Amino acid sequence: MRSGRSTALGGLLGLLAGVVTAYGATGPLADLVLLNGRVVTMVAEGDVHEAIAIAGDRIVCVGTQDEILDRVGTRTKQIDLAGRAVYPGFVDPHTHLLNDSWGQGLSPIEAQALALRNGITSAANMYTPPPETEVYLRMAERGEIRVRFSLYLIYNSSCGDVLGDWYAQYEPLVELAPRLRVGGVKVFSETSVCGGEPIGVSFSDALADELTAEGRAGYGSNAPLFTRAELADIIREAGALGFPVAVHAIGDAGIETSLGAIEDVLRGESNRLRHTILHNLFLRDDLLPRYAELGVVAAIESMSSCFANYYRGLIAPQYGHIVRRWADLVATGAHVTANSDWPWCAQEAISPLFRLQALMVADNRSDSYAAWEPCGLLPEDQFVDAWTGLRMMTAEAAFMLHREDEIGTLEAGKLADLVVLSEDPLLVDSDVLTEIDVLMTVVGGVIEWRDERL
């Protein structure tokens, strides 16, 4: 009997030891903890903590040093941040990291490494034709997708050629392979890069007569590719299958057509699929409030002053204020995201810190546009503050991609996607934002990039 009791007691102690190994005083033990830092959750201004704990692919705790140390076990990896900043991984909701990487001399795998070095943990590939969709799925199945990607499948090409509803063979907004999902359908309301042709910016009748000579020569005869009714039918068909639609629209005519089409589809209901308009460059006063009224997400590029002033030069000076109205968009209460459109706007735009600076400073800081100098300054009334810009690249971008319950902020239960920065962007002058270094990028609890200094 004594022997039997000893065996039973030993088994119980062994079970308890296993529980203690897996759980601390307040919950599961962590696989990785980051201590002694500034953990900026991006949930609310001033919500900053000392440390963060990760178990598996999830955040298990954000809190004080003592709270996180309660999650440390014998197998927990600990990193002393020495005061450095932790942010949610940056989300870039409009890139061409996969489909246009080869034009930059990079494979899709190398382009992902570039994104990770810049702190990007999630992205949308905003131009995905049929053959490439299958290529990316095979890559994901082989474990070659390191950034969380949402693929936007094209309805028509950048030249305007219609491919139709081929996208219907895929299920939207679910993970089809590791770190890969279909995020929606991309529709061009205007032509974009098409061989040697200029981007097909389309102007309304109200502005067509106000174009400069350069504007008339390059863009005067352009019109949207679809009528309002035709575009509404396209969006309605995609939406009936559960696909969010992202519409390429630069000129005020393209934007007006897109907003009208979305309004006709919604018929007073909420924009639950979060249909999005990309670029939004020429915004008349009457178009601004419609984003918030319709719940349309506005995805914009943080451009240099040279780029913005080039477009401002297409129309009469009295209409120059309608170009690059990012602060005005934010002020309406609409959901506004800041993306890179990499590599099309600027090589440096792959850096979220470069894009943040471009939202906050008046002059050109881009080497990509150095040959365009001199160019005028951006108007100060269109600047945003650092908090707003960072939200546009984290929480707001996650919202656009229907992933706000998983990423975009640092909260217990969310995916452990985060970035460690050498300094806190909220605490430095805008002039030195691009001097901040990305020291570590974590995707799903996996350290995908790490500087030797950390």
Image (tube, helix red, strand yellow):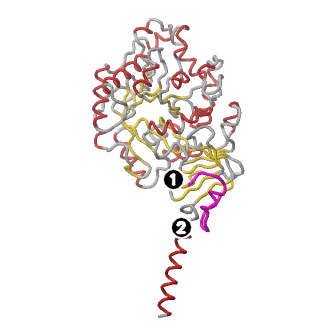
The label shown at residue 22 is 2
Range of the magenta residues? 61-78
Residues tagged 1 and 2 counted as in contact (Cβ below 8 A):
no
How busy is the neighbourhood of tag 1: few (under 14 within 10 Å), some, or many (20 plus)?
A: many
Query: Compared to 33, does 300 lie above or below?
Result: above
Instruction: Name the mark nearer the viewer: 1 or 2.
Output: 2
Residue 62 in the magenta stretch? The answer is yes
Count of numbered circles in the view? 2
370 sits left or right of 413 in the view: right
Is 325 or 335 nearer to us in this picture? 335
Residue 11: horizontal and vertical position, in percent? 49, 82
Give x and y (percent) for residue 66. Answer: 66, 57
State the residue lying farthest toward the top.
209
Q: Return the disc, 1 or 2, that comes first in the chain's sequence.
A: 2
Residue ID at (47%, 19%): 288
In front of the other: 290 or 440? 290
The residue lying toward the viewer, choosing from 57 and 369, is 57
Find residue 248 and report its horizontal and vertical position in percent: 41, 27
From the viewer's perspective, is residue 160 above or below residue 445? above
Which numbered disc covers residue 296?
A: none
Asked if the stretch drawn in magenta spans residue 393, the answer is no
The amino acid beneath tag 2 is Ala
Give the class, few, some or many, for how many residues have Cα within 10 Å of label 2's Cα (few <14, many ≥20).
some
Q: Is mark 1 on a helix, strand or loop?
A: loop
Locate residue 364: give its quadrant. top right
Tell me the amino acid under the disc marked 1: Gly
Please identify the quarter of the rendering in which residue 205 is found: top left
Q: Write down the residue under mark 1.
A: 444
Q: How far apart are marks 1 and 2 (CA)?
A: 19 Å
Kindly identify the residue that appears in the image at 49 percent across and 52 percent down.
Answer: 413
Q: Is mark 2 on a helix, strand or loop?
A: helix
